[in-house]
Image: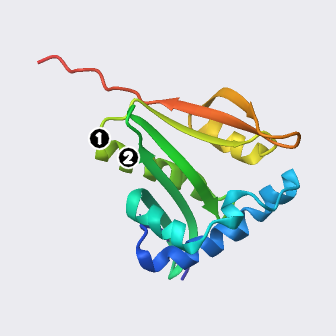
């Protein structure tokens, strides 16, 4: 009998597993851009714990193992900011990234009104760009970082349900 992947709110006890997963998942990005000093690879456990306290952090678990994670918050302009969507390499291409993205969007919408969701990825991260396009995100801007990297900014408007006639 196989185990199911369960998505839940991350706890303080998940911090080390999230950080290890993040380190593993961002190795490909670092190699793609030739930069192993990217923030996901240099983040400290202390700063991750601060994010757990200040932002919505979700994890996907397979049994007791954290195999995916995503972070989000709503800014003062009503924009749902999403970051650090990571899935364990052996679990990729099975829909888990899309499930985590939907789960964090729903969590942010439950917190307060959101007019749009925004996220970013590197310009060479074609798998990420395909996932975000399938989830309804559209490119809004490309911001050069250095000669090897540009951040692609993506946005997904929140559809407001039409009022029903009474």
Q: Tag 2: Cα neighbours inside 10 Å, few (<14), some, or many (≥20)?
A: many
Residue farthest to the top, as pictured? 165
- Nearest the viewer among 162 and 118 is 118
Q: Is residue 112 left or right of residue 57?
A: left
Regarding residue 42, the answer to whether it shows in the image is yes
Q: Identify the residue shown where x is 47% and y is 48%.
A: 102
Measuring from the top left, give residue 101's x and y in whole percent. 52, 49
Measuring from the top left, give residue 63's x and y in whole percent. 51, 81
Q: Which quadrant holds the C terminus?
A: top left
In the rendered image, the vertical position of residue 142 relative to residue 34, given as above or below: above
Q: Which residue is mark 1?
A: 112
Contact, mark 1 vs mark 2 (Cβ under 8 Å): yes
Q: Which quadrant holds the N terminus?
A: bottom right
Q: Is residue 21 left or right of residue 76?
A: right
Measuring from the top left, give residue 68's x and y in whole percent. 57, 65
Q: Tag 1: Cα neighbours inside 10 Å, few (<14), some, or many (≥20)?
A: few
Residue farthest to the left, as pictured? 166
Rounded to the nearest angstrom, the CA distance separating label 1 from label 2 is: 7 Å
Disc 1 is placed on an element classified as: loop
- Nearest the viewer among 35 and 104 is 35
Residue 69 image label = none
Q: Identify the residue shown where x is 56% and y is 50%.
A: 83
Q: Which residue is mark 2?
A: 108
Q: Quadrant of residue 53?
A: bottom left
Measuring from the top left, give residue 64's x and y in whole percent. 50, 82
Callout count: 2
Q: Identify the residue shown where x is 69% and y is 66%.
A: 42
């Amino acid at each position: 009998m196989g185990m199911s992947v369960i998505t839940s709110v991350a706890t303080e006890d998940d911090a080390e597993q999230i950080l290890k997963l993040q380190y593993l998942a961002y190795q490909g990005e670092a190699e793609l851009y030739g930069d192993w000093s990217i923030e996901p690879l240099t983040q400290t456990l202390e700063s991750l714990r601060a994010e757990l306290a200040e932002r919505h952090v979700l994890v996907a678990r397979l049994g007791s193992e954290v195999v995916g994670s995503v972070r989000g918050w709503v800014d003062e302009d009503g924009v749902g900011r999403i970051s650090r969507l990571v899935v364990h390499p052996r679990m990729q291409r099975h829909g888990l990234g899309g499930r985590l993205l939907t789960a964090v969007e729903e969590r942010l919408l439950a917190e307060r009104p959101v007019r749009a969701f925004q996220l970013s990825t590197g310009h060479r991260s074609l798998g990420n760009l395909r996932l975000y396009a399938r989830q309804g995100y559209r490119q809004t801007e490309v911001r050069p970082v250095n000669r090897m990297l540009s951040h692609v900014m993506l946005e997904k408007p929140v559809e407001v349900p039409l009022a029903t006639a009474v």
